[in-house]
Image: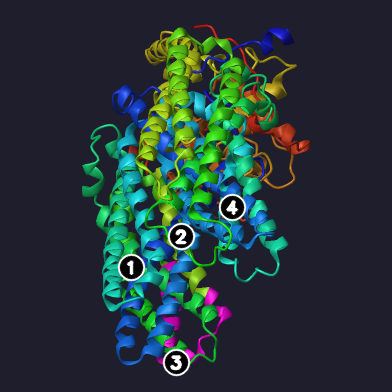
Amino acid sequence: MIASLLTQIPVPKDIPLPLPMAEWILVVVLILSFLLHILFINLMVGGSILTFWYEVRGLKNKDYDTLAREIAGTITVNKSLAVVLGVAPLLSINVLYTVYFYSANALTGNMWISIVPWVTVAFLVLYLHKYSWDRLKDNKTLHIGILGIGVVSFLMIPFIFLTNINLMLFPEKWGVVKGFTDALTLPNVFPRYLHFLTASMAISGFFLAWWFGRKSFKLVDNYESITKTDIKKQMLNLALIATGMQFIFGPLLLITLPSQGVTWGLLGVISGGVTVATIVIYQLWKLINEKNEIISRRFYVVVVLFFILVSFMGTGRHLYRENALKTHRQMMAERTAAHWEAVEKARNNELTPADETQTLLSPGEQLYETNCSVCHAAAQRLVGPPLTEIVPIYENNLEALKQWIKEPGRKRMDYPPMAGFPNLNDQQLTNISNYLLQGKWK
Amino acid sequence: MDFPLFHLDFMGNRMLVAIIAIIHVIINHALAVGFIPLVTFLEFRGYQIKKYNPEKGKVWDENTRKLLFFAFIITTSLGALTGVGIWFATSLANPASIGSLIRVFYFAWLSEWVVFVLEVIFIMIYYLTWKSSNKSVRNKKRHIIFGAWLSFFSFLTMAIIVGILGFMMDPGSWEERKTLLSGFVNPLYFPQLIFRAPVAMMMAGCVALLATMFFLQKENQWRPGILRHISFWILLWMPLAVVGAFTYYWYIPRSMIGNLPVAIATQQFQEWYDSLITVIIAVSAIGFAIGTLGVFAPRRLPKYLLIIPVLASFLFLGTFERVREFIRKPYVIGDYMYANGFLKEEYPLYQQTGLLKNTPYSSIKEITEENKTEAGEVIFNLTCTRCHTTHGINSVVRNFELMYGEEKPLVADAMKAYMKNMHNIRYYMPPFPGNDEELEALAFYIIQQQSRPKRMEGAQLKGVEVKELDY
């Protein structure tokens, strides 16, 4: 019994409203806005890790402290863009995968909502770090410690997103997962995480190579031992190594994907991506070996290649999601259709034999049942006093009773005040009052 | 029903949404919409002063920069995250409702997003170019003009958002007119706008007054002048804020209540509505007192007590924000979806065949004597938890005790009679969506909860049970 319960797949029904625009437009908005969002997320995460790394190195060589500070300056802008740019893909995934996304959110709800305070704190900590550089220059342990809180947060928070985006793809797991930790340990989350983190390092290295390599960037005098070429080279090295590592984490991710979504089409798209990645590696290698101080034209070639690469991978991601959910979506559509047929039948009273008792009641009794019996009973105190106490007061005084029902005052302080019924018309009030005064309720 | 249900059994889901939303709205009004014009105004004054008194001008400029720095830090962290947080929280609190709204307002929200992205970029430019703007007079002029443009832009953002809000809050337009324009021609549009804009300015002034007290030393000879300007700013906008508040106050019952079951609504609405006028008067008095004191005797402004006008102005806005929630009930989407997440149209099916038969997220198909408590809990979860908790905020047990008398054991028959028809006398309550056996189990569960309180965990902790449905 238990075992069969565990393997059952929930088939909820879908929101019965049409999509707001053609599905393909939504998909395009989702993929593009997501790539833009993740680009700045990568820069934010990678940038803060690099700041940390260089500030620690700066303990021995002052130049690296200066470099760390330059990098920290970019995070403020990148992180703000990362957050606002996240709204469009959030909206799009909400509208395209409503049931899936919200189900995953609810099942990991505590961690999901903790993103809000956690990221807020991480951002404030980063500001504190950035603007306390001079004040804390003699207390580097504290200063680096503050950054540490931010970096650890940025390393942990992606797990919450990845867990959600992974869990939404597997409705068969929804009945099994008990809380965030369970969802986190589903097979695909960690490979996704490694893939993301390496991408962050690659993108950040590549971005910073441009940032420090651009013509308008002048090395200030306070660099003693390192040159512009050094920095550029270090950043490009990072980009190359990290991109190279994706050749390990990429396949790991693919292998751990549950097979239900893997198709030849998907493999085709991914192979396309892999091919581009190989070219990227080669071009990065060439770029590193160029001797000039300023970033060359080859850099922009790699930018384009990166864009193509990311588009392949973004499309692959989307294809997998579509494939993985295809069967379940079909089931959901059938159930939704069946449900609305049943709703229609219920509305036409085709499901149950017509209830005759309702029509046998007098109009006054009917009104009494739906309005008054909520709070009053014949001989028993409910919310209000029993009829046996009320009715004698109004004997032969129909009008007073009608008036009271319409706009009651408050007589008994040990009862909550009665709600008035100004919505009932005179005839209705007369009917109720007659019903009460005639005493048929006894 | 069709979602695993997140539930906070102490705080309640609505409180979660309310906290996040109100923080966001306050930051948006006090530190963006109202703050940028104030900062631009102060920057411009500093620029003028600098011409004849460079030292004084510098203090002005630096203090204004610090004010903007403060706003910049808060808006780009807490402000931005609570903005996104509203999406997160509403999707947990009522997924059916936000999922439906998103299908209709996707385009509106996407446009709002574009404006929002631009606003963040502009605020960053404005702040991050401040120091370099002091290099030359020309730069400073350009910077001030950019500030003015940004002020206009933030106002525009608000004008757009109020339109979208108006559209969503107009209960009648949901089914009939699905064009966004109706939000802007809605009778509440201008009252809302002329209320919000000056209130935002006033709030910004209150915050700036408090912040300046901390940024500048008491001994600083230019401090009184700056405080006087900010106080003047508060006084300047106050009459408009009060007029706006009264206009809004006057329009609320005339336009929004119109679509509700008027008469029933009135009585419960009236209590809340009356409290509004008290708030308007109290807050205006505080604002007026502080503003006047600041203009005539800035040296006497009390440093820490300045938190009072800040909180009062927040309260001012907060009270009015409640109207939107209040007006909507018992629906979450006017005449379409009830606050419990069930569609009006689906009610006959559920009331005839039962909720349990129709939910994939419970293993129970039939209610028996053995599973009655368990079934009651499922029903409670499905029908009540979007607004109520067992023993926390807006507790069901407590609400029943308030009606039937404290510490008296609850009686199932009375509760059943009440829940079956409660929507007739408590207009904000949706009708009970299930069948009689389910009502019975629910009453049973609540009675159990009264005698043996037991926390009800949401899906985020206990997960969901799944059953296959026949369809």
Q: Nearer the viewer, residue A65 or A220?
A: A220
User: Which numbered disc, 3 or 2, marks the residue that appears first in the sequence?
Assistant: 2
- Have a look at marks 3 and 2 and say if they share a chain: yes
- Is residue B298 found inside the magenta-colored segment of the image? yes
User: Which numbered disc, 3 or 1, marks the residue that appears first in the sequence?
Assistant: 1
At 50% from the left edge and 24% from the top edge, which residue is drawn? A100
Q: Is residue B73 left or right of residue A26?
A: right
Q: Nearer the viewer, residue A60 or A389?
A: A60
Residue B297 numbered mark, or none: 3
At 33% from the left edge and 53% from the top edge, which residue is drawn? B253
- Have a look at marks 3 and 1 and say if they share a chain: yes
Q: Is residue B257 left or right of residue A260?
A: left
Observer-side mark, 3 or 4, equals 4
Chain of the residue where label 2 is placed in the rendered structure: B
How did the renderer colour the structure? rainbow
Observer-side mark, 1 or 4, equals 4
Chain of the residue where label 3 is placed in the rendered structure: B
Q: Which residue is mark 4?
A: A51
Q: Which residue is mark 1?
A: B198
Q: CA distance from mark 2 to mark 1?
A: 15 Å
For numbered disc 4, what is the local secondary structure?
helix
Q: Which residue is mark 2?
A: B27
Rendered location of residue B122, percent (x, y): 34, 58
Q: Amino acid at mark 3?
A: Ala
Q: Residue furthest front?
A: A291
Q: Residues within 10 Å of mark 2 (few under 14, many from 20)?
A: many
